[in-house]
Image (tube, rainbow, N blue to C red):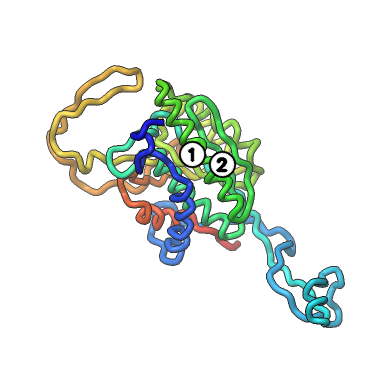
């Protein structure tokens, strides 16, 4: 890639996405009000298999729970105590099609989409869930199977970086067309089970004629959650004449006569589902605080 494609806000770096773990944890401690209320209702899985602690054996304890390592070290019988597991599986869908590979202020919309999905992913694995990735590239899909713990999130970050680099190279080579977003959703059923959560970050360009039907199919057995990544230039550009290029390659000019007033919207509706609006020009810490409250780790039944 050329040096321009390696610039900050254009290229996607693994170190920056890993560092968002601290941003995610900080935002969870002091969440802000957001457009999408409520948490994600996870399912209980019996007594659980994750060891929470050990204690000395008392009469009546199940011998199958003996902790042989602690018993050998102390010379006293110890049993393991397990914590209840909650089965939260989240599929992160990142739109890296050509329409996302632009930005006027802080970063490309594609980079912001990866940042927001990383914040959500860190929240999921820190609360004991599993996270996977479906990256929509100009000419293919990149899939990372859902896994738990930090290792699972690192795999997702690796997929985000690889997918974004591939998308930049495709556009540099002259690729301009956006495949319909609806086609990518056909893979969701095969990637995560019923009851899972799908979080898509996109500009929602070139949806495809059956996009609404695809979302409704997913909503019957899974939880679709949408994040609309925008670059709210209309609120900040000064008056003037600006050149634009349309998806078909034709070039035009638009004239902005006055600054727009009012406050930017925080929510929109896409295919009948609420979508949180994230401004690509905002600092990632601001967006992370909103996402932390909208995508709470857990809601206990």
Determine which quarter of the picture holds residue 127. bottom right
For marks 1 and 2, give the CA distance. Answer: 8 Å
Does 99 appear above or below 293?
above
Where residue 211 sits: x, y (%)? 49, 30
User: Residue at 52% across / 46% down in the picture?
Assistant: 157
Marks 1 and 2 in Cβ contact (< 8 Å):
yes
The residue where tag 1 is placed is 94
Where residue 12 sits: x, y (%)? 43, 42
The answer to whether 170 appears left or right of 248 in the picture is right
Query: Which is more toward the observer, 213 or 50?
Result: 50
Q: Quadrant of the N terminus?
A: top left
Q: Quadrant of the C terminus?
A: bottom right
| Element on which disc 1 rests | strand
Disc sitting over residue 276 in the figure: none
Determine which quarter of the picture holds residue 72. bottom right
The residue where tag 2 is placed is 133
Q: Crowding near pointer 2: few (<14 within 10 Å), some, many (20+)?
A: many
Q: Is residue 198 visible?
A: no
């Amino acid at each position: 890639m050329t040096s321009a494609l390696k610039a900050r806000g254009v290229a996607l770096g693994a170190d920056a996405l890993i560092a968002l773990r601290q941003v995610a944890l900080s935002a969870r401690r002091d969440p802000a009000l957001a457009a999408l209320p409520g948490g994600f209702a996870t399912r209980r899985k019996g007594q659980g298999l994750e060891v929470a602690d050990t204690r000395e054996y008392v009469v009546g304890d199940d011998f199958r729970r003996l902790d042989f390592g602690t018993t050998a070290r102390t010379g006293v019988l110890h049993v393991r105590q397990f914590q209840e597991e909650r089965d939260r599986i989240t599929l992160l869908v990142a739109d890296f099609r050509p329409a996302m590979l632009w930005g006027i202020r802080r970063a490309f919309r594609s980079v912001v989409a990866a940042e927001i999905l990383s914040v959500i992913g860190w929240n999921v694995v820190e609360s004991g869930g599993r996270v996977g990735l479906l990256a929509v590239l100009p000419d293919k899909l990149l899939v990372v199977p859902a896994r738990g713990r930090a290792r699972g999130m690192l795999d997702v970050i690796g997929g985000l970086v690889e997918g974004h680099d591939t998308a930049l190279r495709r556009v540099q080579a002259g690729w301009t067309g956006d495949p319909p977003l609806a086609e990518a959703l056909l893979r969701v059923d095969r990637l995560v089970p019923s009851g899972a959560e799908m979080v898509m970050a996109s500009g929602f360009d070139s949806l495809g004629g059956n996009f609404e039907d695809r979302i409704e199919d997913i909503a019957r057995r899974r939880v679709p959650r949408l994040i609309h990544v925008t670059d709210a230039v209309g609120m900040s550009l000064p008056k003037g004449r600006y050149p634009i290029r349309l998806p078909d390659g034709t070039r035009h000019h638009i004239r902005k006569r006055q600054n727009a007033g009012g406050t930017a919207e925080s929510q929109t509706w896409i295919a009948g589902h609420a979508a949180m609006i994230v401004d690509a020009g905002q600092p990632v810490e601001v967006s992370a605080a909103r996402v932390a409250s909208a995508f709470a780790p857990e809601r206990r039944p």
